[in-house]
Amino acid sequence: MSTCVPGIAREISASFKLQSKSRLNRLTLDQQEQIFVRHGEALGMLLIVVDAVNESPRRSEVTACLVRMASQLGNLRIIVSSTGDPDFRLTSQAFQLLEVEMKPSVVDGDIQLYLQSALDSKVSLSSDLRLEIKKSISREAQGM
């Protein structure tokens, strides 16, 4: 983004210089949102990907920020992933929302492949122990 709109880099750099005196060394969510919205229209299609938003202790703030940005930037598309949390829903009348629910069973194959790869590298473990570990983790993973 900063290559296409150099003002973004200048503004972020200036914000960090101001904050370095107070030792914060990071931009607040509000500052990031303001910078993004201020410069976002100058770009073509924008895509933000947020993974596992439900695992953030600030998920309400993050999703509210995303909704505000989507409402203000017509060229913004957002992909948000979240595990099936009944207390978490992203809603807005300002934009189209496509929700795709991913069931834990969908990722079971990926979990099995990862476990196989990880356990294969542990040659010091007996094959019986590796099998028991794989069964135990697979049983408890529930798609996570």
Image (tube, helix red, strand yellow):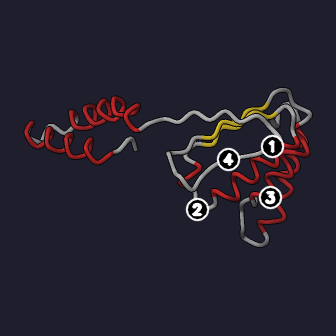
The crowd level at tag 4 (other Cα within 10 Å; few <14, some 14-19, many 20+) is few
Circle 4 sits on which residue?
90
Q: Are marks 3 and 1 in contact (CB under 8 Å)?
A: no
The crowd level at tag 3 (other Cα within 10 Å; few <14, some 14-19, many 20+) is few
Circle 2 sits on which residue?
57
x, y (%) of residue 134?
21, 40
| Left or right: 65 in relation to 137 | right
- How far apart marks 2 and 1 lie (CA) works out to 25 Å
- How far apart marks 4 and 2 lie (CA) works out to 16 Å
Question: In this rendering, is residue 120 above or below 91?
Answer: above
- How far apart marks 4 and 3 lie (CA) works out to 19 Å
The crowd level at tag 1 (other Cα within 10 Å; few <14, some 14-19, many 20+) is few
Mark 2 or 3: in front is: 2
- Callout 1: SS: loop
- How far apart marks 2 and 3 lie (CA) works out to 16 Å
- Callout 3: SS: helix
Which quadrant: the C terminus?
top left
| Residue located at (85% from left, 26% from top) | 44
| Residue located at (82% from left, 45% from top) | 69
N-term mark: 4 or 3: 3
| Left or right: 114 in relation to 68 | left
